[in-house]
Image (cartoon, helix red, strand yellow):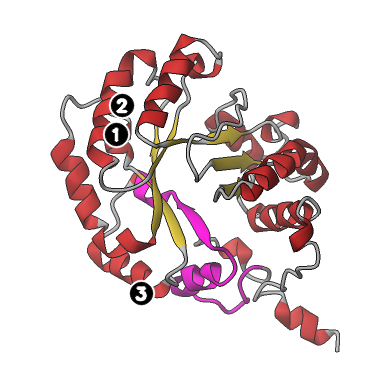
């Protein structure tokens, strides 16, 4: 997401209007996980505006609409192709398309998943997020899934929600997040040149740091191997998501000597505070 008014005064200047959020976001980050397409199709005018606001090196990861990813149609080729055509102004900016599957989509549905990959993979890079428990027990179903994705050069999304579930649900936002987010084993898998990691944190920075510690080594090793990992960070209400991403980046610098002397600039919303010190 990028349209979060709670980020005013930190990521965004206080006077930032909502229509300018995306441009401000893209001035700091180089990718976004676009959840909006999961719930409803943006109209053509909105898509054109996004395309006009984003720099050429920015990468969107848009989700396949839930009406397609959560309904096992016998043949949804025309619907998927129509959705892809709707996004045509954004094609140069798409890092990959995110196919998020519900927990009900399991080993018995691998033929259906194959059909989706047959349709989408010739058009765009894809990452697939699965939530069925059988895909996390290192058994035959998981082996078959990974082989299928590897065959199509499709990445498997790694979701790490351990930090989120490590604390009691003592706020409405935390309770809501724990009810909605999956609690699954973490398999740090990489099937292509663009691994995808989604980290769901909590409000406590030290707890997040504890749980993402192994990711620092993993992400650094992927970078050294020439891969381009996509890393996305969430918190229960996402108010602290940008700060979590920055904290992770600072810690990652210690794993990569070539980045240890890089300085992260203040966010646009913080620059006024910096100037006030002089």
Kindly identify the residue that appears in the image at 42 percent across and 30 percent down: 150
**Image: 48 above or below 214:** below
Q: Circle 2 sits on which residue?
A: 113
Vertical side of 229 occupied by 264: above or below: below
Displayed quadrant of residue 92: bottom left
Label 1, on which residue? 117
Residue named by callout 3: 52
Residue sticking out furthest to the right: 278
**29 inside magenta stretch:** yes
Q: Nearer the viewer, residue 131 or 36?
A: 131
Q: Quadrant of residue 179?
A: top right
State the quadrant of the C terminus.
bottom right
Q: Between disc 2 and disc 3, whose residue precedes?
A: 3
Instruction: Indicate whether residue 267 is drawn in magenta.
Output: no
- Identify the mark nearer the N-term, 1 or 3: 3
Residue 1 at least partly seen: no
Seen from the viewer's position, the closer of residues 39 and 139 is: 139
């Amino acid at each position: 997401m990028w349209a979060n008014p709670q980020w005013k005064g930190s990521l965004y200047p206080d006077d930032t209007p909502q229509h300018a959020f995306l441009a401000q976001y893209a001035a700091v980050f180089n990718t976004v996980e676009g959840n909006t397409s999961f719930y409803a199709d943006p109209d053509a005018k909105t898509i054109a505006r996004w395309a006009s606001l984003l720099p050429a090196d920015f990468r969107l990861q848009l989700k396949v609409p839930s009406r397609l990813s959560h309904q096992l149609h016998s043949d949804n080729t025309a619907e998927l192709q129509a959705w892809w055509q709707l996004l045509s102004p954004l094609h140069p900016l798409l890092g990959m398309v995110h196919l998020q599957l519900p927990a009900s989509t399991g080993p018995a549905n691998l033929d259906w998943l194959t059909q989706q990959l047959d349709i989408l993979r010739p058009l765009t890079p894809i990452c697939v997020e699965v939530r069925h428990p059988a895909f996390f027990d290192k058994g035959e179903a998981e082996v078959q899934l990974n082989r299928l994705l590897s065959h199509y050069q499709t990445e498997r999304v790694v979701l790490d929600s351990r930090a989120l579930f490590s604390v009691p649900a003592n706020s409405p936002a935390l309770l809501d997040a724990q009810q909605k987010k999956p609690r699954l084993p973490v398999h740090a898998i990489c099937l292509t040149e663009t691994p995808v990691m989604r980290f769901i944190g909590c409000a406590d920075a030290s707890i997040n740091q504890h749980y993402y510690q192994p990711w620092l080594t993993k992400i650094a090793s992927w970078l050294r191997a020439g891969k381009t990992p996509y890393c996305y960070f969430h918190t229960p209400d996402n108010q602290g998501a940008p700060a979590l991403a920055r904290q992770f980046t600072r810690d990652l610098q210690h794993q990569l000597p070539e980045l240890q002397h890089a300085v992260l600039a203040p966010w646009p919303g913080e620059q006024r505070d910096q100037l006030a010190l002089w």
